[in-house]
Amino acid sequence: MLKVELPLHQKNIIITRSKDKISDIRKLFTDKGARILDFPAIDVGYPDNLNPLDDALSEIDDFHWIIFSSSNGIKFVDERLRNIDTSLKECSRKVKIAVVGEKTSSALNDLGIEADFVPPEFVAESLIENFPVSGYGLRVFLPRVQTGGRNLIADEFRNSGSRVVEVAAYETRCPKSIPPETVNFIANRKVDAMVFSSGKTVSNSASLLEKEFGEEWLTFLEKTKLLTIGPQTSKICLNVFGRVDLEAEKFTFEGLLNAAIDIFN
């Protein structure tokens, strides 16, 4: 039998992600031969104050559109709606839903909902440029992260004449530490690549690395390739780490996988 050489064979790769979101992404990389090192860079939970979210959800049927920019927004909005004996699926019969991103669209599908609009490219700019109707007169609900997210969508819809209700539906917080096995690989400079899926994973990773290794933390990654999921993540990575070795052509985890394969082959 011929041996099949996998493109990421013997490559040690860190995927910075929330702990509960890593399993499906891990398989993408391990199927290509990579060894994945655990490095949860985000803890996701409810925002500090739930009142603005609950107030918006109490009149959700009055909105024309809900725009989700992450799967976390979908998860936490649906959870809160279930507390008032309804669901996002029930609301989707009256309110149109747009999403930014393939994973966000997939999270909606998991609830049995098909998005009314998904932009051709998985970035906020593409949603704004290709939105199917004029924003004038629309009432738009934007559930978002409490801190660190972009205001572009809200600002553009307001400028076009929409009434925008923008509230925190969840918050991403920095975990307390890096798993010991991953610390050992970093300390011995055996990490081949580090993959970033958002600006928050970049900044949180840097904080955790500095906490573990001190002021010289960047020196432990001198031989590690830094891969990013898109332009906004790249911008923050350049600012925090001083470089980006490759940005995914397609702004998805499949795009990041292809970037990893490209950079090592």
Image (cartoon, helix red, strand yellow):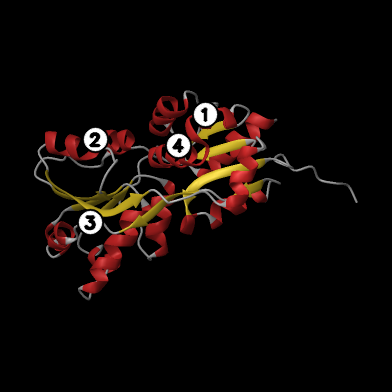
- In three-dimensional space, the C-alpha distance between marks 2 and 4, rounded to whole angstroms, equals 25 Å
Give the mark toward the camera: 1 or 2.
1
Q: Give neighbour class at mark 2: few <14, some 14-19, many 20+ (Cα, 10 Å).
A: few
- In three-dimensional space, the C-alpha distance between marks 1 and 2, rounded to whole angstroms, equals 35 Å
Q: State the residue in front, 241 or 111.
A: 241
Q: Residue at x 63, y 29 (%)?
A: 263
Mark found first going from the N terminus, 3 or 1: 3
Give the mark toward the camera: 2 or 3.
3
State the residue lying farthest toward the right.
Answer: 1
Q: Give neighbour class at mark 3: few <14, some 14-19, many 20+ (Cα, 10 Å).
A: few
Q: Residue at x 24, y 35 (%)?
A: 152
Mark found first going from the N terminus, 3 or 4: 3
Q: State the residue in front, 66 or 190.
A: 190
Q: Is residue 149 left or right of residue 255?
A: left
Q: Picture quarter containing residue 76?
A: bottom left
**Could you say whether the residue bearing mark 1 is in a helix, strand or loop?**
helix
Where does residue 251 sit, x and y in percent of width and height? 46, 38
Give the mark toward the camera: 2 or 4.
4
Mark found first going from the N terminus, 1 or 2: 2
Residue 216, label in figure: 1
Give the mark toward the camera: 3 or 1.
1
Mark found first going from the N terminus, 2 or 3: 3
Give the mark toward the camera: 4 or 1.
1
Residue 152, label in figure: 2
**Could you say whether the residue bearing mark 3 is in a helix, strand or loop?**
loop
Q: State the residue in front, 17 or 211.
A: 211
Q: Is residue 173 visible?
A: yes
Q: Give neighbour class at mark 1: few <14, some 14-19, many 20+ (Cα, 10 Å).
A: few
Q: Residue at x 47, y 28 (%)?
A: 241
Residue on which the image places disc 4: 206
